[in-house]
Amino acid sequence: MPDLEARAWRELDLAALRHNVQVLRGRLSPGGELMAVVKADAYGHGLAETARALSRMGVRAFAAACLSEGIALRRAGVRGLILILGWTPPEEVPLLRRYRLTQTVADEAHGLALAAAGRPIRVHLALDTGMHRLGVPAEDFNALQNLYRQGNLRIDGLFSHLRVADSLDAEDAAFTQEQLSRFYAAVSRLRAAGLPVGKLHIQSSYGVWNLPPQPCQYVRAGIALYGVLSQGGPVQRPLDLRPVLSLRARVVSVRTVPAGEWAGYGRAFRAQADVRLAVVSIGYGDGLHRDLAQRGGQVLIRGRRCPMAGRMCMDQLLADVTALPEVRPGDTATLIGRDGPRDISAQELAARCGTITNEVLCQLRPRLPVVTR
Ligand SMILES: *Cc1c(COP(=O)(O)O)cnc(C)c1O
């Protein structure tokens, strides 16, 4: 077996994942269940490794973005509900059936086209309550009734997505309440018409952080499951979550660069005095932001912060270890995670790169092997 930690790797802390699952379960309404959102390679954590671990923790509902992710989950041995959150072409109905996947109905036309494919499938209806991305307009009762008339759509659930649940701004909080009202109004109207609504779900991570438990059967948790906020800033109901992912790479070479020399591509770094540079075997080809060094990026080596130096390469980066003469090839460099007393969070990287942790994490490339702890 190759040494998975030879070059650069993603490390999953399964105890942290288990802890997060328990903490999130503590925020469900009675009878509620966690739906683990594992789209985009489980937010860069590794789809199969993460989903298998969650299955062992008793998670029985998963959400993927697209058909290929749903199939990958079944091939990884995942059982239970797999909901495809995005649009799937109606021609793929046979694959939805073969892999027992539950498809989101993206709008009325999509639902009719899926039904016209000629074989029954399980679906959840997305309701558009104000995000205006996917979903049947929640107030369009005719469209909803029409979908219920399609014998090939087995409607197991109804859901919606909140647009500004991450905001504590009063106007945004009012809009979230408006979305909740539209959702429950549609549910009541369908129930009154004798139409079975199945499982309901509307909260994702920020819905859990900022709202009380909802009278629904599922909570769709993504970023919270992985133990990080999308961005800094307060939430109404903080959760004691632990980051699951660490990102580490090997120091493969250490060299002294004399004063006045340039290092790396271009003219991004010039040694002001003699410096010692560590070559770390990870780069933008692994999903790091190429501009990270210029934005103050650092790595942890031997428990100390070392500044990145020069232009990041596709497969390597340089770190200035002049202050740490004991650094040797073979040392581990930490890009995200803890090393001794110090820690670099995904949120720190996201802030440097002007984005959210979701993007930083889901950029991580599959060539980074996943190691579980
Ligand atoms: C991605 C996604 C989620 C998960 O969102 P988090 O903020 O990561 O919890 C939930 N629902 C839908 C529809 C999504 O697209």
Image (cartoon, rainbow, N blue to C red):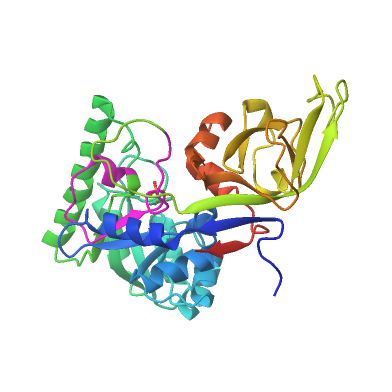
344 on left or right of 215: right
Q: Where does residue 234 sit, x and y in percent of width and height?
A: 31, 32
What residue appears at the point 75 percent right and 40 percent down from the top-left corner?
278
Q: In this view, does 101 lie above or below 278?
A: below
Give the residue furthest to the front: 326
Residue 64 pos. (x, y %): 46, 61
Marks counted in the figure total 0
Residue 211 part of the magenta-drawn span = yes
Residue bounds of the magenta highlight: 206-231
| Secondary structure mostly taken by the magenta-highlighted segment of the chain | loop
How far across and down, in percent of the image, does residue 211 sit?
A: 22, 42
Question: Which quadrant holds residue 146?
Answer: bottom left
Foreground residue, 315 or 112?
315
Residue 359 visible within the image: yes
Q: Residue at x 56, y 66 (%)?
A: 68
Quadrant for the N terminus, please.
bottom right
Residue drawn at x 58%, y 50% as measured from the top left: 247
The answer to whether 132 appears left or right of 275 in the picture is: left
Residue 139, percent across and down? 25, 46
The answer to which of 95 and 207 lies nearer the viewer is 207
Quarter of the view holding residue 219: bottom left
Q: Is residue 174 above or below residue 285?
A: above
Q: Does the magenta stretch include residue 126?
A: no
Query: Is residue 234 shown left or right of residue 189?
Result: right
